[in-house]
Image (spheres, rainbow, N blue to C red):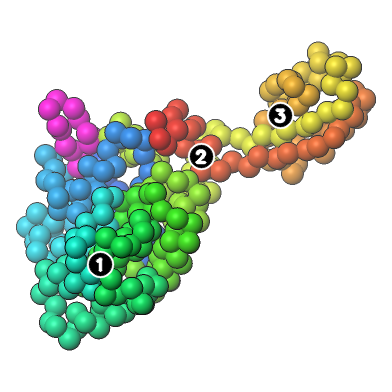
Amino acid sequence: MNNILEVSNLSKTFENVEALKRVSFSIQNGEFYGLLGPNGAGKTTTINIISTISQPDTGYVKINGMDLKNHSIECKKSIGVVPQEIALYNELSAHENLMFWGSLYSLNYADLQNKIDETMSLMGLTDRKEDKIKTYSGGMKRRINIASALLHSPKILIMDEPTVGIDPQSRNLIFDVLEELHKNGMTIIYTTHYMEEVERLCDRIGIIDHGNIIAEGTIDELRETTKAEESINIHVENSEHINTEKIKQIKNCLDISNGVITFSSKNSGKDLPLILMELNKAEVGISQIEIHKVNLETIFLNLTGRKLRD
């Protein structure tokens, strides 16, 4: 395996609060990795350490085989960071902002101009290049924030909640850009509170809770490691006339309420015909069938006992 990032035994304590407890994981070159956790779980602390904003109490981070502590300048050249808070100067134009941030990477003038033109085009904002940031919408500011992190062509792009509070048009454009960057081989580390974003974008997911990585893998792998099951909701006709005691004896019947019978299932395709056969024997009229697959939200709740925003 070609790991571009290796995180090993990271620990960090803030005023007697143990934010990280020997966190370890690795990311392969070109991988899109989602780091998920409830508020206060330790993901921001982990991101801050990888981004060189904070130092761990113990453990280490290696980027391209180089220790972050001993080779911080070389490592910083390999990473681009898109912070949760927008880091732009409102009184400057987008072009001036990108000139400022690009100059911090010691790019020569001609190369920087080319990268600014390239990233502005990528973000769909070429025609707004000379407009002041204060005239931009929230979504446009987010897009410039991302552009500033791409100017030095980083090998790893670290994104901390990049779509918070933006319009659907900007969100979809950002998704398209990220998918293109990923297709072209960029490694991306992504945190978000939106499960559907992770399901769409990420190759692999790490779930952190109480300062520990408690699960890691693809969505299919995480689904296998949890006890989360699909649910089958059967909407019935004339529910007041059904024999609830008899129905409760059907295998995996969880609940009967408000005209809906709910069953758990490890394989709805296999179980549904058997359930329908039993309901037919009980002379239950069916008006609607709903199958709820195990998604990332279900897996996350099963692993942590908390919603992502808790």
Amino acid type of the residue that numbered disc 3 sits on in the rendered structure: Phe
Give the foreground label among 3 and 1: 1
Residue of label 1 = 132
- Residue corresponding to mark 3: 263
> Would you say 12 lies left or right of 126 here?
left
Mark in front: 3 vs 2: 2
User: Left of 112 or right of it: where is 273?
Assistant: right
- Residue 65 image-quadrant placement: bottom left
Q: Return the disc, 1 or 2, that comes first in the chain's sequence.
A: 1
Secondary element at image label 2: helix
Magenta-drawn stretch contains 265? no
Q: Which residue is mark 2?
A: 297
In magenta, the rendered stretch is 9-22
> Magenta includes 17?
yes
Give the amino acid type for the residue marked by disc 1 in the picture. Lys
Report x, y in % for residue 55: 11, 46
Which quadrant: the C terminus? top left
Magenta residues, dominant SS class: strand
Residue at x 74%, y 44% (from the top left corner): 269
**Which tag, 3 or 2, sits closer to the chain's start?**
3
Q: CA distance from mark 3 to mark 2?
A: 19 Å
